[in-house]
Amino acid sequence: MKNVIKFYEKGSIEILYGKSSHSFPLHSHECFCVGAITKGSALFTINNTKCLLEESMVFIIPPNTGISITANSQYDYITICFKNELKKQVEHILFNKFFLKIKSNDEIFNLCDIFKENNNEKQLLNSILILINSTIATNSLVMETSTNNTVLLICEYIKQTAAKNFSLDTLAESFYLSKYHLIRMFKKEMGVTPYQYYIQAKMGIIRRQIFNGKSETDLAINLNLSDSSHLCKIFKRQMGISIQAYKKNLIRK
């Protein structure tokens, strides 16, 4: 089955509509994501918690939380990603679970349709938080959480050097840490290993630059990948679709 994902971007909101049989490797998002399975099923693992999601089941992915998806058949889904300032508004919220059953998929689809008409980002975020209110931990709205400053510096370093080859030894030496301590500390805070975060940073560059007229060969060279085939394989493994399909199915408002 051919995987199809349609991307809708407006301001600090990105909405994904997907039909897929793709299994996504462990990764994380810097944004806050909420979505639902609209047909079929897939095994989700979020922050080491597993759940077989079926129709009308919602998943919640806080920023920098590890997630993987294992699929044995086709599943359809919708995902809403809140970025930038919207993400900052939910960073302090704690969740007592990452999965929720709702009455109907129409609840999420209707909220997205309203957003497309009125462009009210805060209204969409607040409506989603009301929808998933039962998953929010008691008193979490007044609790403050912060990421280890060293980890934040490591993240910035990885982003700035994402076009180069990855070296765990160099990374550990740059921050005067042992490799093993660095990996444990980083994964605890970011949900993924430094190498997985590096691949995500590379993906961010690819997603930003594939519309600037550069060929896939030139982009692969700039990112220190062996060839355009390697670049395309990384993209499809992480995104579930080809670069060409991504270009075709992205709508920016």
Image (spheres, rainbow, N blue to C red):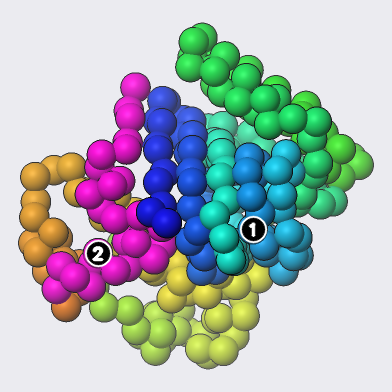
Q: Position of residue 179 (x, y in %)?
A: 51, 88
Badge 2 element: helix
User: Would you place residue 7 above or below residue 109 in this image?
Assistant: below
Residue 114: within the magenta? no
Disc with the residue nearer the chain's start (2 vs 1): 1
In the rendered structure, the answer to whether residue 88 lies left or right of residue 131 reads: left
| Coordinates of residue 168 in the picture (x, y in percent) | 41, 85
- The three-letter amino acid code for the residue at tag 1 is Ala
Q: Which portion, as a residue range, is magenta? A: 227-253
Q: Is residue 150 visible?
A: no
Residue 31 in sight here: yes
Q: Nearer the viewer, residue 44 or 29?
A: 44
The label shown at residue 253 is: none
> Hey, which quadrant is residue 238 in on the image?
bottom left
Residue at image point 49% right, 38% down: 17
User: Residue 129, how many percent across, how many down?
Assistant: 73, 31
Callout 2 amino acid: Cys
Asked if residue 5 lies left or right of residue 178, the reply is: left
- At a point 60% along the width and 72% down the height, the residue shown is 187
Q: Residue at x 62, y 19 (%)?
A: 110
Secondary structure of the residue carrying tag 1 is strand
Provide the residue designation for mark 1: 42
Q: Which residue is mark 2?
A: 232
